[in-house]
Amino acid sequence: MKPALSFCICALALLFSGVANAQLTSLQWVKTFGGVYDDYGRATASLNNGDVVSVGNFFSTILRHEREESDGSAIMFRHSSDGSLIWSANSGLSNHDRYSELIVTSDQQIVVVGKTEREDTRSSDALIQCFDANGTLLWSDIFGRNNHDSAICVTELASGDILVGIRTFEESSSSTVTADIAFLRY
């Protein structure tokens, strides 16, 4: 057998033996939230103490913080390590917000990104918000320059600054679509 082929066979055997010996993790808990409309999660991160923060979009009236409409809202949950709900919060802007991603920073702040739709035009702007670990809004920013802007990803840089990726696209009157990406550093 050729040495390269022997190496590949040995490498594959080691890889698959490791996978075959892997133990499945047992399910620890399941918690569901929602109501009669479509509700869904988008992203999850953990705090240093083991609590879990999740974001998503909520179309039901339960946990809607005084919103009676069935339009979607950006929603965030914090659960203890055993799955108990500690708090929930929404963006506080409009009934047309969407969270798409979150991170927990090294100093335990929660940065969430997504979009908020303008009621008058149904176009959207990127939404960037920062909360403390208790769900209190620390700061909020909206970035919009085209018809449809949405924050799609977020990371913490080694410096502690926050980098947000924005998807932008604009439809012209001639039905031409121009799409770009922008990066915001906070």
Image (cartoon, rainbow, N blue to C red):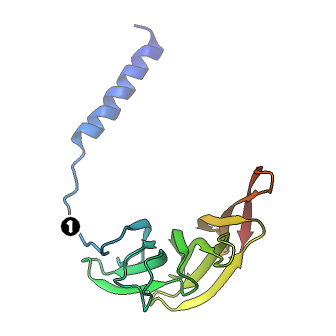
Count neighbours of disc 1 (C-alpha within 10 A) and say few if under 14, some if 14 to 19, many if 20 or more: few
Nearer to the camera, 158 or 150: 150
Work out whether 173 lies above or below 34. above
Quadrant in which residue 27 is drawn: bottom left
Q: Which residue has dot 1 on it?
A: 28
- Which residue is depicted at the point 40% across and 16% down? 6
Q: Is residue 151 left or right of residue 96?
A: right
Q: Position of residue 30 (x, y in %)?
A: 23, 69
Mark 1 residue element: loop
Quadrant in which residue 170 is drawn: bottom right
* Residue 186 appears in the figure: no
Can you say which quadrant of the picture contains the C terminus? bottom right
- Which residue is depicted at the point 22% across and 51% down? 24
Q: Is residue 148 left or right of residue 153?
A: right
Q: Position of residue 163 (x, y in %)?
A: 67, 68
Q: Residue furthest top?
A: 1
Quadrant in which residue 10 is drawn: top left
